Image (spheres, rainbow, N blue to C red):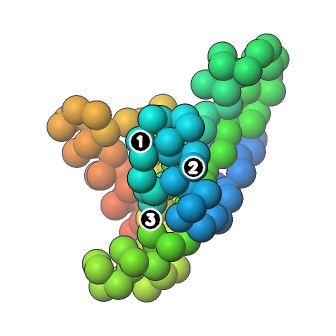
Amino acid sequence: MRRILEDHGCAGSDLTVVFAADAYVHELNLKYRGVDRPTDVLAFAMTEIARSEGPVSTDEAERVLGDVVISVDRAGAQAVRYRRTLDREILKLVTHGVLHLLGHDHEREDERRAMRRLENRYLRQLS
């Protein structure tokens, strides 16, 4: 992940990766996104958390990017579905989550394509 952070000017930043069961990710998805189902990866950027939970210094928000939460259950199912190793699928999901923390999104088609290109580029570099 160091390469991704360096490329985005965040080499000195920290983030947390949490590996959880579907039930917990489902709970987070419902609570924070209003979506009543589990998902494979969630990203909670520190700048968003700071806005919703009170003041955090600018230095802290820049140093701590946030949290990436991976559903190990979803990762396992997707690894089988897409014929990847579990390690490869988890690497893909962590990469996706980190890109979200860095401000990338995939709401629009052009954003989706750009984010997919970045994911694939970093996955090639990290493999």
Classify mark 2: helix, strand or loop. Answer: helix
Horizontal arrangement in the rendering, residue 64 relative to residue 126 (left or right):
right
Gap in angstroms between the C-alphas marked 3 and 1: 22 Å
Residue visible at 63% across and 64% down?
Answer: 20
In the image, is residue 104 above or below residue 42? above
According to the image, label 1 marks what residue? Answer: 35
Mark 3 vs mark 2: give the one in front: 2
In the image, is residue 34 above or below residue 43? above
Residue visible at 70% across and 47% down?
Answer: 15
Give coordinates of residue 12: x percent, y percent: 75, 41
- The residue lying toward the viewer, choosing from 69 and 118, is 69
Horizontal arrangement in the rendering, residue 46 relative to residue 90 (left or right):
right
Q: Are marks 3 and 1 in contact (CB under 8 Å)?
A: no
- The residue lying toward the viewer, choosing from 104 and 10, is 104
User: Quarter of the image containing the N terminus?
Assistant: bottom right
Residue visible at 64% across and 65% down?
Answer: 19
According to the image, label 3 marks what residue? Answer: 92
Classify mark 3: helix, strand or loop. Answer: helix
Three-letter amino acid code at disc 2? Glu
Gap in angstroms between the C-alphas marked 1 and 2: 9 Å
Horizontal arrangement in the rendering, residue 61 relative to residue 99 (left or right):
right
Horizontal arrangement in the rendering, residue 78 relative to residue 2 (left or right):
left
Residue visible at 56% across and 37% down?
Answer: 31
Residue 27: assigned label: 2
Give coordinates of residue 82: x percent, y percent: 28, 78
In the image, is residue 56 above or below residue 62? above
Give coordinates of residue 124: x percent, y percent: 39, 69
**Lower sequence index among marks 1 and 2:** 2
Q: Are marks 3 and 2 in contact (CB under 8 Å)?
A: no
